[in-house]
Amino acid sequence: MPLEPRSCEELVTFLRDLHKEFRSHGHEWENNTLDDFLEALAAWVHDSPGVYHYAGEQIPPDGDWTFMARALHAATIYE
């Protein structure tokens, strides 16, 4: 599942693929309830400057489609 959407349409495709992944393998996700998923999403977004720094990247100053996709994907495993 690519984490680099460059447009709204690509983000929509990403989200649909993420939904399909959940329907097929959601029971395997670390955060497989909406409550856990949203908490993980908030935690990852909060910690994302450090995540980007550790990866040798800079967080986009105004956000972008890729940031949102990474945030949503990270919420599937982020504690």
Image (cartoon, helix red, strand yellow):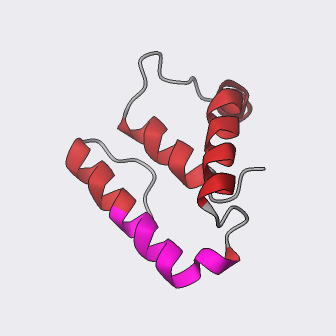
**3 left or right of 50 in image:** left
Does the magenta segment cover residue 20?
Answer: yes
Nearest the eye: 4 or 76: 76
Which residue is pictured at 70% across the width and 37% down the height? 43
The N terminus sits in image quarter:
bottom left
Residue that sits furthest to the top in the current view = 61
Q: Position of residue 38 (x, y in %)?
A: 61, 47
Q: Residue at x 43, y 25 (%)?
A: 63
What percent of the width, then of the height, locates residue 79? 78, 50
Q: Quarter-wise, where is residue 32 in the image?
A: bottom right
Note whether 24 is above or below 6 in the view shown: below
The number of numbered discs placed on residues in the rendered structure image is 0
Q: Image point 38% across, 30% down: which residue?
A: 64
**Picture coordinates of residue 48 (x, y %)?**
65, 31
Instruction: Note whether 35 is above or below 33 in the view shown.
Output: above
Task: Determine which quarter of the picture holds residue 16.
Answer: bottom left
- The boundaries of the magenta stretch are 16-27
User: Considering depth in this image, is 56 or 52 the residue closer to the camera?
Assistant: 52
- Give the residue drawn at x 63%, y 59%: 76
